[in-house]
Amino acid sequence: MGSDRAELARLCSARNWSKAIRLLDSILVRSPSSIHDLCNRAFCYSQLELHKHVVKDCDRALLLDPALLQAYVLKGKALSSLDKKEDALAAWKQGYEIAVRDTTDLKQLLELEELVSSVKICETTESADHVMDSSTCDTKVVISEDRVADKSLAATTMADTKTVVCEEAIGSSKVSSNGDTKLTNYNKKTDHNKVSSSPVKDSTGTQAPKKAPKSDKKNKAKAVKEINGRAEGVTVRTSADESETILLDQTLFATKISKSSKSISLDFRLSRGIAQVNEGRYDQAISIFDQILRETPTYPEALIGRGTAYAFQRELDSAISDFTKAIQSNPSAGEAWKRRGQARAALGEFKEAIEDLTKALEFEPNSPDILHERGIVNFKFKDYNSALEDLSTCVKRDKKNSSAHTYLGLTLSSLGEYKRAEDEHLIGLKYDESFLDCWAHLAQLYLDLAYPEKLLNCLEKAIQVDSRFAKAYHLRGILYHGMGRHRSAIKELSIALTYEGSSIECLYLRASCHHAIGEYKAAIKDYDDVLDLELDSMDKFVLQCLSFYQKEMALYIASKANLEFSQFNIDDDVDPLFKEYWCKRLHPKNVAEKVYRQPPLRISLRNGRLNKQDFKFTKHQTTLLLAADSIGKKIQYNCRGFLPNQRQYRMAGLAAIEIAQKVSKAWRFLRNPKNIAKLVRKRDKLNMSQNRGGYCSTSTLAGSPTSSPNEDRISSGISLSWQDVYNIAVKWRQISEPCDPVVWVNKLSEEFNSGFGSHTPMLLGQAKVVRYYPYYQRVLETAKTIMLDLKYVNNAEDRAIFLTDIEKLKKIEVASSCSDLYHVVGETYWVATRCDSMAFRGRRLEGTRITTQNMGKTGFDFAIRTPCTPSRWEEYDEEMTAAWEAICEAYCNDTNPTRDPGMLDAVKDAILRMTYYWYNFMPLSRGSAVVGYVVLLGLFLAANMDITASIPPDVQVDWEAILSPDPDTFVDAIKPWLYPSTKISRCLKDYTDVSIAFNTTGSVVAALTSVDP
């Protein structure tokens, strides 16, 4: 130990501060509570102007000894150099008050008194003259990307001249709109007003270097502080004592020019290298560091500097190599551990990044910066519980860290703590109202929760901060699209694209909006632009795949625009292989080779341009649209995450009215005494591979691509099958949002035979899915009941795992989470909900599968999955046929059922029973929930009953059906709020026939689009 002290004295005498710090690092590893060595290291850091490190060491020392006066002196000086004058004065005052109470060190008392007084004098002088006296404030040469101080070597040796460069390296990161985030990285410089989207969501607000306008008081004296986008005030003084504000970016750390003749050359070159990094001149910086490392190959500071330059050039492997060498040279170099963690994070090596940042914390326990960094990595690793712990500790120690607050908000949102998440975002904005990423994250929270008013207000404020903030317009476009306002969405997305022209997310969404409103030429152009973009992530590749399929679908719909809507038939016209790949978002190469493509746009548009006349509605059409809007709004789920969508309301209303018109015609035919004998049980076997050819078909059979025989049969009122009824709603759902792959699962050929199924998660790892997590506890209890009843589950290979052991059954009884159940079973498993048959007494159908899958440290995937195999389809087809005939019999057996309340209740019950089987069946690739309720509304209307009630808050009708073991349980759950709201209504006869009023595909598109003129 004595030799260490002697060496430390020698190094300090030689002004070799870097090596002195390394020696103190090793001493503090052995004696971490040595307050004097902490102050010694803080002093050495101050000589290198690493002011943030000074503050950290002083804070650690003061935690150990709150009366350590030297720490207050050094901390105040460091804060003053960081231009945190108020914080510096507070530190000195606190130390002075302690010194007055206990005057054991008069020298320190007088020094603190002098420092406090000097700040007050300095403030007075500045107030009077608006210029700070150079005698009390050192002149600084600031090296930034915008401004390079050109000083000669002689000038750099002036005692009062210092080279100041911010300590932290700045990286960039991105947040996706769909939830999936990308890691903090050095990959590229991004403007502070850019937030990349990818539905997931996220940027760190990195600010590109530029001079802030002197007239902008909000931005005055700000510089980027750290890798995650926090801004911290830094007032810059030039040699002429002019106050100027420069935003520093991509900076590393500073080294003071040593007064020792032995080390002046090395320190000067190191300083120059750091300056080059700070200016973004990475090649020059690397060249300087190369020279240093040729002479001293293991010099840690040079390795860290070169590694940082490599990192900003996206040469992350080289950066990691240099940081690793720095660690090997000096294992106590916490900065190297930290920076290697950041670089690994940028590569997506989350586990390794967390290990490095954890190691860095050993050298700087409870460091807010490292906790902040590790918290973000944990968030992006989807280990939200660990992120919560890190970020909560960070904001306790650094209350004004806006970035930490907003990432804490993101973490809390993922964990389902939405009010706390909102509060954290607002706290972040309180400390930095110009922090655009925080506005974007708060807006994303409101979007996820479906709070449109709050979202629009939030985005308006973000645009006030920066009118060129592309992410704000993108989010507003997403909102308008989700509300069915496609024209408004196009306007917002177009603005976003003027500022960020290569945004694949904006291009794709704008193409989808053009597609939906019948602007097929514009849609094709945007889809082509998406396909031409170069990609840098798998998320974007998925959008390119979808653009291929949706371009084909846009061409298909364009070719049908001026034909009868009955000839719009995706399920029969489009090749099963195409639909399968579209639903699964697979690479289209196989489809492009095997499936006949749509004709070019010029051919599709020959008959496919929407007529202006389609957008001019007659009085009867307008009456019909108003009625549809009133009926359709009843589909709205009043739950978190479900936006009100005027376009979908109109779709639902028109579909319900058309269903009612066709069903009532069929019922009139059946109630005719001459035809009553024709009501017999019919089980039409579905042709599971039915495909009549068409432009997207591999079939070589000639013939019409339409389903005219069925349409003629339905229109004539001769008979209707249950699938005919539901298919009316399916077609309306398909055309209302044509980029959603809504298709009958039995028309997916191979995918159907292998058991295509939907997947609806409640819990994804540790993340609670905002729409569906409210049903988590009920699903968990249902799973427990099934496991205790059957005493077995099925594993991923569909093999039975028996649970007959008494101890296991007891653990299942007391299980309070899906994690508890998983640990009882020991592997991925599923159980099927109960669904009792009414058509065949004693038969039990396979309902929905409740699945639990281990996702490692990040938790469990707890979801419901609905398979659709041929055998399952056959069983449900029989059940749906019987349920549909029961409705027809209940209504048609009485000549005037509206006079008998008991008969009407029987009709209501029968409709709900068929709805129950539909929701357990789930025969569509998506959209089954809304289609089921649209048919329910249409059937009530056909029976001269108008439903006036909205669905109650926190009720999702499809989930109620899935969790009911039999149809009567479902009826009992729904009728208390549904039946009292029904009233007898004969308004149906007043409505124009929907299939006549909007007889072409183009007129249907126009009717839906007119909700947002």
Image (spheres, grey):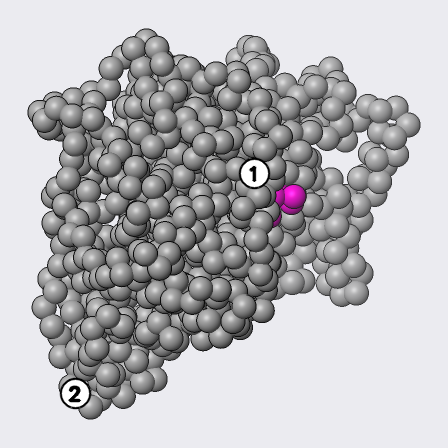
Quarter of the image with the C terminus is top right
* Residue at 53% over, 18% down: 613
* 172 in relation to 829, above or below: above
Write down the region rendered in magenta.
451-455
**Horizontal and vertical percent position of residue 906:** 43, 71
Instruction: Decide if residue 308 is on the left or right side of residue 88.
Output: left
* Residue at 30% over, 23% down: 556
**Horizontal and vertical percent position of residue 228:** 50, 39
Dot 2 amino acid type: Asp
Q: Nearer the viewer, mark 2 or mark 1?
A: 1
Instruction: Decide if residue 934 is on the left or right side of residue 320.
Output: right
Instruction: Decide if residue 635 is on the left or right side of residue 572.
Output: right
For label 1, the crowd category at 10 Å Cα-Cα, with few meaning under 14, some 14 to 19 and many 20 or more, is many
Q: Which residue is mark 1?
A: 624
Question: Residue 760 colored magenta?
Answer: no
Q: Is residue 433 visible?
A: yes
**Horizontal and vertical percent position of residue 347:** 30, 37
**Chief SS of the magenta region:** helix
Q: Nearer the viewer, residue 546 or 124?
A: 546
Q: Which residue is mark 2?
A: 805
Q: CA distance from mark 2 to mark 1?
A: 63 Å
